[in-house]
Amino acid sequence: MCGIVGYVGPRASEKALDVVMEGLGRLEYRGYDSAGVALVAPDGVETRKRAGKLANLRAAIEEADLPETATAIGHTRWATHGGPTDQNAHPHRGGRDGKLALVHNGIIENFHSLKGRLESEGVQFTSETDTEVVAHLLSAAFERSGDLTTAMRETVADLHGAFTLLAVHSDQPDVVVGARRNSPLVVGLGEGENFLGSDVAAFIGHTRHALELGQDQIVTITPDTYEVVNFDGTPSDGKAYEVTWDAAAAEKSGYDTFMEKEINDQPHAVADTLLGRTDAEGNLTLDELHIDVEELRAVTKIVIVACGTAAYAGMVAKYAIEHWTRIPVEVELAHEFRYRDPVIDERTLVVSISQSGETMDTLMAVRHAKELGARTVSICNTHGSTIPRESDAVLYTHAGPEIAVASTKAFLAQITASYILGLYLASLRGTSYGRDAAEVMAELQGIPAQIETVLAGMDRVKEIAYYMADSRSVLFLGRHVGYPVAMEGALKLKELAYIHAEGFAAGELKHGPIALIEPGQPVFVIVPSPGSEHGLHDKVVSNIQEIRARGARTLVIAEEGDEDVVPFADEVIRVPHTSPLLAPLLTVVPLQVFALHLSTAKGLDVDQPRNLAKSVTVE
Ligand code: F6R
């Protein structure tokens, strides 16, 4: 939530504004309530900010006669304290001279008491934000030391909460100072220029050399140098790495929306996540493992923590991991896990799933699990982000950057990675499924081509979406691994098309939800493979008949060749045959495509749905 960018270039360069605006364009998915920039020159700081999307700021900049500078910072906002207005937009100015500007991502929890103190000292506020408090504190600290890094160290000592801060001051026009606690900040290293960003997308058009920062650190960049210190002043090096994708991966590549591109990227997301998972002896491996394998063998319980779509990936993972490892698996929304009294000990493995690696609720759940003595594994799409950094083991998904706010390709990559984790644990524990891991991996290798097949057959789904554009409510039914797919289908529709949607376990239907069925009610049903164990296929076909008998309009997702569904389906959407546990990688795709086109049919912003932002870095 909130995207921030900082840039310092050579003194003769005038491109700071362009670099920062380009970075904000790439980070807009992190928040689009307002946007702003601050340009720094020795004779002062100039700011421009506008409520609404970045386009409003662009228009304001075009009209303005802004100074050409080599240093700038920028911000796209997801509002927390104070509405989405021009006044509350960042950057905020500090001090009476207005020489300092600050942008912020996160929440300063003690801002009320700090504000009271500043007001009693005569400071006047121009916004309702928590950020402005920090701008004034920082400005006062600068007056004492004359150095922005020292002032930042002094200021962060007074702050509670989660924050990334970037500050500039016209007395040090070649410097941008950043600070982070529980909120993301990455350094981009250029030649004669350096960058700061909420994520690497901010500067990917200029450099792929990046520097990971640790918790509670301050970084100072100038055109030729960077320096990292901990909040206590001790020096640190940061961890340099190369970004493995380039600017093209963060562009629409001819698609109308990022979401459409990302749905079509899914075969690659799965294939890349499967790459290089075996060592020279053919054993499955994780990317980073700081846990003794004996400890992994001794695990008695797995708890998966995640939010939203990632939690639905976790629900799919539960079916697979329990089946292959025989270890009990619980799945819990990360924000609930932390605030109850979970039964966790050193033989519990807590697996977090997160695309961004920065979701505050998931991060806090991981920390809580560690405090309780658990071992932690992270499944994550963002290299070097906080959750994998703080976990004992990491399995990276290789979906590439996900820019659309609604998650699609990351979901498929998360499911794929959790299968790999399940098979890895099964092989460690020597269960029969562990010995069969190679067979499952071979079947997984064939999934990308099957996703292509599903994608190639989506014309009818698109038509259905258009004629259903006026629907007021859509229900989704699934069973076994189809149940989380139903929930994910409903979530996609809610967030993209603002339509009431609910996903149910098909077996639950007669325990209540069937009362919702009235003539014309659209219901998607995800039908298990006819080869599924325990006759689940036939049970779901019976469910279709039950709702059809009550007037539901049935939209059935079923395997090629499954003719049993035909008499009871208003529409049949076909997917290729897979082993039942792997089916979500195919059955969710038509639901994503449906939500995308229904949102488009309603004329909505597919990539930036209202009220949302990617990467929820506040609780
Ligand atoms: C829904 C969606 C969210 C995220 C959730 C977790 O389309 O994108 O529900 O899945 O906020 O985010 P990460 O995976 O970054 O932890």
Image: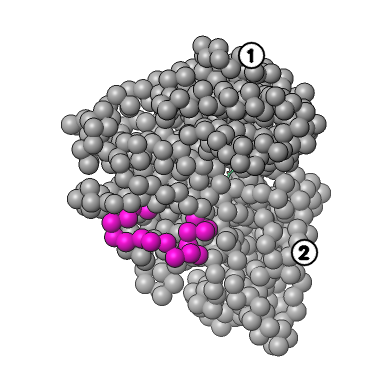
Q: Amino acid at mark 1?
A: Pro
> Is the residue 411 above or below the residue 172 in the image?
above
Query: Which residue carries the number 1 mark?
Result: 567
What segment carries the magenta color?
Answer: 334-350
Q: Please tell me whether residue 328 is drawn above or below residue 522 in the rendered image.
A: below
Residue at 54 percent across and 66 percent down: it is 162
SS under mark 1: helix
Q: Residues within 10 Å of mark 2 (few under 14, many from 20)?
A: some
Task: Specify whether residue 560 is in view.
Answer: yes
On the image, the x and y values in percent for residue 230 come to 41, 69
| Residue 533 in the image: above or below residue 393 | above
**Quadrant housing the N terminus:** bottom right
Check if mark 2's residue and mark 1's residue have beta carbons within 8 Å.
Answer: no
Image coordinates for residue 158, horizontal then vertical, percent: 54, 78
Residue at 42% x, 58% y: name it.
366
Q: Residue 175 or 263: which is nearer the viewer?
A: 263
Q: Which residue is mark 2?
A: 87
Residue closest to the eye, 237 or 616: 616
Rendering coords of residue 215 (x, y %): 43, 63
Q: Place residue 111 in its image quadrant.
A: bottom right
Residue type at tag 2: Gln
Q: Is residue 185 magenta?
A: no
Is residue 347 highlighted in magenta?
A: yes
Say whether residue 176 is left or right of residue 492. Answer: left
The answer to whether residue 366 is above or below residue 492 is below
Secondary structure beneath label 2 = loop
Residue 306: image x %, image y %? 49, 50
